[in-house]
Amino acid sequence: MATAIADPLARKYQRVFKHLDADGNGYIEQSDFASFVDRLAKEYKLPKTDQKVHAITAAFDAIDTFAALDTDGDGGLSCQECVKGCRQYFNSNSLDEPGSWFFGRF
């Protein structure tokens, strides 16, 4: 049985994780990122050639971004890694934290 997360921010990050985990296997892989971008484009009726779609795809396709967030190196982002990355992105002042790469190299 899954443990409930008491922290409201962690619950929000967990919901983000569930949206990104397209195949529902408990990990976010590169293919899940691609599926997420496809769903966004479809939702907003944007062609794949749209500049916004291209920018999001470029950020998600960055192998170094994915590798930085995959702190245990198993090839997928667990919910814990995703929550930790979100926290670091929004709360850390250090560019050395893996979470500072959460949305790619901007």
Image (tube, rainbow, N blue to C red):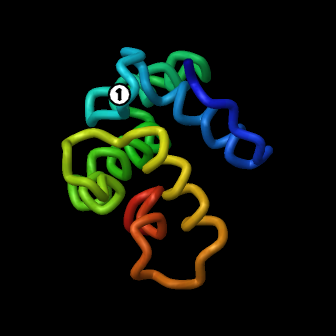
Q: Quadrant of the N terminus?
A: top right
Q: Position of residue 28 (x, y in %)?
A: 36, 34
The residue that appears at 69% across and 38% down in the rendered structure is: 5
* Secondary structure at numbered mark 1: helix
Residue 91 occupies quadrant? bottom right
Asked whether, in this view, residue 40 is left or right of residue 31, the answer is right
On the image, the x and y values in percent for residue 82 come to 48, 47
Q: Where residue 15 sits: x, y (%)?
A: 64, 31
Q: Quadrant of the C terminus?
A: bottom left
The residue located at (35%, 42%) in the rendering is 77
Residue at which label 1 appears: 32
Q: Residue at x 40, y 67 (%)?
A: 98
Q: Residues within 10 Å of mark 1 (few under 14, many from 20)?
A: some
- Residue 27 image position (x, y, % from top left): 36, 31
Query: Observer-nearest residue: 55 or 99?
Result: 99
Instruction: Specify the amino acid type for callout 1.
Output: Asp
Tell me the quarter of the picture where residue 75 sits. Answer: top left
Q: Eyeballing the image, is 93 above or below 22?
A: below
Residue in view at x 55 percent, y 67 percent: 88
Closer to us: 35 or 69: 69
Q: Quadrant of residue 50?
A: top left
Question: As drawn, is 96 to the left or to the right of 72?
Answer: right
Q: Is residue 83 left or right of residue 75?
A: right
